[in-house]
Image: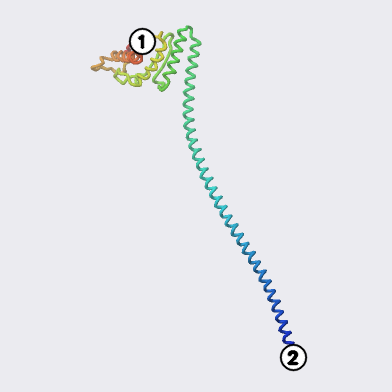
Amino acid sequence: MQTACVGKKKFQSSQDALLKKESEYAELIISKGELEAKLEACENLKLEEVQKAENLSEDQSREIENLRSQITELKSQRDRQYAQIEDLTVLTKSANDNIGKTLEQLEDRDKYVRMLQAAKTKTDSINLALALNLKSVLAQGIEDQDVNIEVDKTVVFINLSDKMLYKTGSSNLTGRAEEVLGKIAMIVASRPDVEVMVEGYTDNVPIKNSCIEDNWDLSVKRATSVVRVLQDKYGVDPNRLIAAGRG
């Protein structure tokens, strides 16, 4: 009987210990589950942060690329603006030159208008109009110092520089001279009532050679050269032409 009682106590003690172990095991299982849940949450959070960082890196890369593109475009715009400024500088200079020439032409026209208003006869008015027309035509491509047109009563004077018409000591016309004479011939042809006297001037140094006897001879030959071009090349009636020389 005594032995049986001792065994029962041992069994109960073992049973209690087992229950305690099972309780501890259950607590461990719960704790393990909680830890795993926390670990998973941490891993998910870490993954989310990594993803955010990667997305941020991609956004930054795109932003950097956009900024580079903007910088390139701004540089191109700057270069284009520099080019436009250079073009405008050239155009401004050209425009200023053209404005200056236009103002000079307007001043000349105003002068002739005033002279026309003051003209006493119809002939005076016609000659003034002819002079204005000649000046307008000859002004294209000819330096001002190479041509001078004046009106004195019933006569229109066209003074062309010798250096443009001839070479020194020669009566042969230059190609430039024939071009200018062509413009004059065009105006003269439109006025069949006008006679043309061509006065040749000599050089300011004495001359004598096998072809030219003296300065008088040179001046006459120069006038004759002009008359022949007007007649032969541009068809001006020779009956309207007079050649004369000056010493």
Of the numbered discs in the image, which one, if any, rests on residue 192? none
Q: Quadrant of the C terminus?
A: top left
Q: Is residue 84 above or below residue 28?
A: above
Q: Position of residue 231 (x, y in %)?
A: 34, 13
Q: Position of residue 34 (x, y in %)?
A: 67, 69
Q: Position of residue 177 (x, y in %)?
A: 35, 19
Which of 151 and 43 lies nearest the eye of the viewer? 43
Residue depicted at 40% across the width and 12% down the height: 189
Residue depicted at 48% across the width and 34% down the height: 87
Query: How would you rate the neighbour count of disc 2 (Cα within 10 Å): few for under 14, some for 14-19, many for 20 or more?
Result: few
Which of 34 and 52 lies nearest the eye of the viewer? 34
Comes first in the chain, label 2 or label 1: 2
Q: Are marks 2 and 1 in contact (CB under 8 Å)?
A: no
Q: Which mark is in front, 2 or 1?
A: 2
Which of 129 and 33 lies nearest the eye of the viewer? 33
What kind of element bears circle 1? loop
Residue depicted at 59% across the width and 58% down the height: 51
Residue depicted at 74% across the width and 90% down the height: 6
Task: From the image, tell me which residue sits under label 2.
Answer: 4
What kind of element bears circle 2? helix
Q: Is residue 4 above or below residue 147?
A: below
Q: Position of residue 206 (x, y in %)?
A: 28, 17
Task: From the image, tell me which residue sits under label 1.
Answer: 237
Q: For residue 29, what is the image quadrant?
A: bottom right
Name the image colouring: rainbow
Amino acid on which the number 2 mark rests in the picture: Ala
Q: Quadrant of the N terminus?
A: bottom right
Amino acid on which the number 1 mark rests in the picture: Asp
